Image (spheres, rainbow, N blue to C red):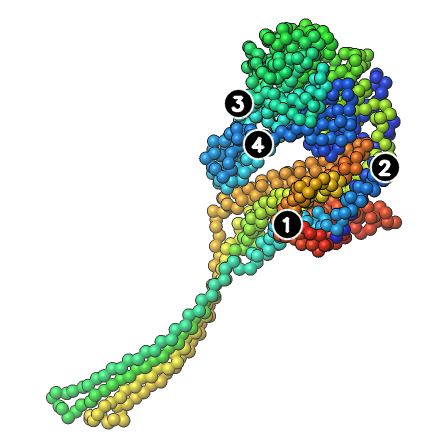
Amino acid sequence: MGRHKPFMIASVLLLSFVFAATASAQSAEEVLARFDDEPTVLEVQRVVMFYAGLDPDRIEGWYTRANVAAILPERVTYQFRYRDQDYSNIRTRDDINPANKDVSLGFQETIDDRNTKAMQHDARVQWDFSEIIFNPDVLRAAREAGRMAKQRDDALTTATKIYYERRRAQIDMVLNPPANTADRLRQELRIQELTANLDALTGGWFSGALRQVGKSPY
Amino acid sequence: MLGLWLTAAVACAGWPASAAGQGTEFGETLVWFDRSSSLLTNGVSAVALAPADGKTIYAGGRGYILRSTDNGLTWRLSLLLSAAEFMTEIDDVFLFDEDDDVSFEDSEIYNRFTEMRDALLEDLTDEYGEEYARTLILEMGSELRDEAIGEFTSDAESAAFERDYVARVQRFSAMGFSAEDAEAAAADPREVWDLVVSPTLPAHVYAATGQGLYRSTDRGRSWQRLFFAASHREQGVLSVALTPDGQRLLIGTVAGLAISSDAGATWTFALGEVSSEPIRQVIASADGKRFYALGLRRLHRSHDGGMTWSRINLGALSADAIRQLALPTEDEDYLIAVTDRGLYTTIDGGESWEGMPTAGLDRTGLLQVLFPTESPDDLMVVAERDVYLKGANDERWRTVSNGLIGQTLVEATRGAPGEFWLATSIGLFQGLSGAEAQISTENLRALERIWALEPTPDRVIRQALAFNGLDDIPVDQWNTRAYLARFMPRAWVRFSWRQLRNEHQNSALVGDKGGTIPKAAQRWAEVRGRDTGDFDWEVFALWNLGNFLYSPVEASIESVGQQMYRARKRLIARTVRLLIRRRALQFRIVSTKRLSLANQIAFQVNLEEMTALIDGLTGGYFTYAYEAKARSASAVSPTTDAALADAPVAPNLFDDVLLRQ
């Protein structure tokens, strides 16, 4: 996990010609080199961005999907109906001729028995063709893009400030070693506090990265 | 703005060392060097040097006083001005709880909100008609409120950074404050307005601050507050003056002029008009008997050591236009006034004023006049952007601003012969002449090389916009498409398929017992079956003809477009500010000499931090482009990376940069 090389190039180049005292410049480099194995600020920014769900690629995805979405129907309905009907009708007739009892149709029964099955499939597909030309959801995505830009700037600025506040505290501890235990604890506590702040912004990733290189974050 | 600054920066970087500053009548060059190092990353509003010391310097800024005992090489915090105890009252003046809508209605911000809303409503009504405009305003209500809060806070912040007290009062008044509130808020409890070292006791330092008068009797190691008023609103001390014997103290406060004859133990407010307004400057004549007090609205004079005061009739001059008064000689009737229209002088104690020659002097933003030599005819003028010199025999003013880039100047003070100290919005500068004034040509060339490798500001801005999705705001395209969309109907297709199965139908006639009709004839049966299937479909189309007259989507497009333009404006301003600060810091590094190891590291960390902030806005582009160019500069032929850094604007380079680590 090397330090941020471009910064080094710029800064070292600048400082090397500014400060004639070579020994002093080397000392500055030596001091800063102690933190080479820690996560770089760009790595921290990247993790903060993803952890906070502020990745700008999301916005691009929203635009694309909002434009394509209208090609698909906005509503599809399907209805299925099934009817099973049994019909049974029994009629009973008994014809009696009171004048001539010898002639009779007798008892008569008519049975009418029916069974009907009906199935119906109904489907409805609806498009809003105006949204193929212009989908208002694009506006929501755009509004969100503006909001996210501000949130991202806030989050990354906060993370960057904390990162360098921590680095300054580390450097201070190297350049001005604490004279007693109380001072040492105070300085260490300050660094731990800033580490915890970075952890809060990165979901614990920062201290995990420190542990990976064998440093105890707390 | 950026272009101008860069032109100036490059011009400075390209100076031949021998031409850095023109020769003056004093026979020397004058170049400004940053002496604030990393301790003074904020602006400096007041500076004072211990007389006959040459090594001890005090610098005050918003919230702090710093002390250097090695002529500006290293600095230590001397006094920290916390505003916490004053904040409750300040809150009452212009802050409110954002969660409390009632407070919002009562706040100054609400006025800002209603003004903003009304102005926008008027504009939109002109363009779209009242009904539609009201719809738009309703939709933008909460955004306008947020914007009003943001603007108000930003205005209050920027007003608080005006060095000039009058300008602050005017800014707060324009924001809707009453005169009393504006005068109190303008004093700002964190501000250091004036620093004075006792002429007789060099270990004694006085600091006029927004929360009273402080004094140190041990060269700034410890401080005690000498003056504080009963009300926080009258607490601010804007100026301090001592009689030449150091016995009598006069302070200009927000509530008027107060005098102490017992080294600050007790205070008495002067009688009369001089105690009816904030006093911005108090100056004493060489004999310690005559004083001038420059108020917010009037100029006052005392002939008796401050006991009684009378008002000076300024004629055509207006007191609130005077930025500073100076007494060039022991003649207490000879005054120079620096105003926003030029320099004026009087030889009769202010009864009549005459304009001074201004050839070569940009009269806008004049702040201060001081005397660079023992001769009262040699003058130096500090303006917001430049420093000017004029010798007794010169006809024109000459600019002596070499080394000052991008900052706002505040005030200067004279040090050893040929040496000056200048407080600016970004720190403290030392003006040197002669051999000391030479910036190493090698340093400047190296800086030029580094700047050539860095991505150009316009490219950084484009990348910042692209990374944040604000590079393209297609309002016109949206409007066109929304218009065309009205012609397209909402349509639906209905499909229906029906199937009927009459599986069987049985009918039977059954005879029961004997009758005359044979049984066989009495029976019949019928079995029937039937299947049917139907398929049909319909197409419907629906147009909303009302949309041809008014479509709600237009309001949304307008609203979103305005939001995005505002976000874009904010982003560009922030990116430009960071770029300027970063380059100013680089220039500070090359113009700073004799840095301690701690300060070297501090500078480097500051530079890294600023670069990281720009990277945060551009998705790592700044570093990516620098790295690519640096690689191609060291290679025989340009690499693909360099072409990428120059040509397209890549959206998110965090991963690319990290992969190279």
Q: Which mark is residue A199?
A: 1
Secondary structure beneath label 1: helix
Secondary structure beneath label 3: loop
Residue labelled with disc 4: B84
Say which chain tag 2 marks: A
Cα distance in 3D space between marks 4 and 2: 44 Å
Secondary structure beneath label 2: loop
Mark 4, other Cα within 10 Å: few <14 / some 14–19 / many ≥20: few
Q: Amino acid at mark 4?
A: Ala
Cα distance in 3D space between marks 1 and 4: 29 Å
Asked if the residue at tag 4 contacts the one at tag 3, i.e. Cβ–Cβ closer than 8 Å, the answer is no
Cα distance in 3D space between marks 2 and 1: 39 Å
Compared to residue B299, the image places residue B216 above or below, namely below
Residue sitting at x 80%, y 34%: B595
Q: Position of residue B522 (x, y in %)?
A: 26, 90
Say which chain tag 3 marks: B
Judge if badges 2 and 1 mark residues of a common chain: yes
Mark 2, other Cα within 10 Å: few <14 / some 14–19 / many ≥20: few
Q: Nearer the viewer, residue A55 or B303?
A: B303
For marks 3 and 4 on the same chain, the one whose residue lies earlier in the sequence:
4
Asked if the residue at tag 1 contacts the one at tag 2, i.e. Cβ–Cβ closer than 8 Å, the answer is no
